[in-house]
Amino acid sequence: GLFTTLLLSAIDIPNVSGFSTARRGIITVTTTSKLTMSSSEAETPLSNSDHILFDMPVSNNGARVRAILYYKQLSQQQVEIISPMKLGGLKSEEFLALSPQGLMPALTIQKEHDSGMKHLSESDTIARYLLAEYAGTGPSFQPDNPRSNQICRWHDVYLTTIQGCLYKPASRFPIGDYADRKSAISAFQKQLNTIEGFMSDEGMYLCGDDVSLADAALFPTCIFANYMLPKFDDSQPP
């Protein structure tokens, strides 16, 4: 539809290489500023970067943060992407110490920061931290644009909370207030249409001529919708 077509054409994420995650060992969460990895020889840092983003490509919420890294062309020294599996998985004690809900993405701040914070969770929080931290690098993503913020908030409250209707088995229902897949998908499509009404009529991006946080948030979710919604669209022939 129009919404997905606009999103697929509105954001062209550059190819950025160099985010190596090839490390082995047992991870230890310490009271020092850096996560460490125990090996048979010595305890070494999991990464010497300023930040570690714990994420995997299957997460549309994590993709919001990765889009910011790619557009701003942040280096691996600034933010290194590492799989949560390096900590034993999402429900391991080590990962839960960083993200109490056991959800990705999660960000570890390994350098000294005025806030005193060492770990952040929730993609919107992480995204806004990185936009502030690297405000002078690349596009701003317009963190104070009310149109963008409206779209992001609507996406986080009304879309991601029921997106499981696109891929979870029937045994995992109900999802939220919806007892079955059909009613949840109907609500999902309704919220997409509502968000389309928030979009700017001008420019190639959702909020006009420049990329915004709304683009980073919605694009990955609409990839899900673009590939998965047709499987459940009763209006289309089998």
Image: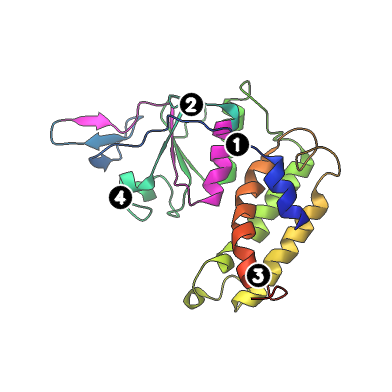
Q: How far across and how far down the image is residue 122, in percent?
A: 53, 47
Q: Nearer the viewer, residue 114 or 66?
A: 66
Q: Which-is-in-front pick, marks 1 and 3?
A: 1
Residue 174 relative to residue 51: left or right: right
Determine the secondary structure under disc 3: helix
Is any part of residue 214 visible from this angle? Answer: no
Which residue is tagged 4? Answer: 88
Task: Tell me which label, 3 or 2, sits earlier in the chain.
Answer: 2
Q: How far across and how far down the image is residue 71, in percent?
A: 60, 31
Q: Amino acid at mark 1?
A: Ile
Q: CA distance from mark 1 to mark 2?
A: 29 Å
Which residue is tagged 1? Answer: 13
Q: Amino acid at mark 2?
A: His
In the current view of this chain or complex, which residue is farthest to the top?
136
Question: How many neighbours does mark 4 have within 10 angstroms: few (below 14), some (14-19), or many (20 or more)?
Answer: some
Q: CA distance from mark 4 to mark 3?
A: 33 Å
Query: What residue do we see at 58% from left, 38% from top?
Result: 67
| Quarter of the N terminus within the rendering | bottom right
Q: CA distance from mark 4 to mark 2?
A: 27 Å
Image marks 4 and 2: residues in contact by CB distance under 8 Å: no
Residue span colored magenta: 42-70
Relative to residue 42, is residue 183 depicted above or below? below
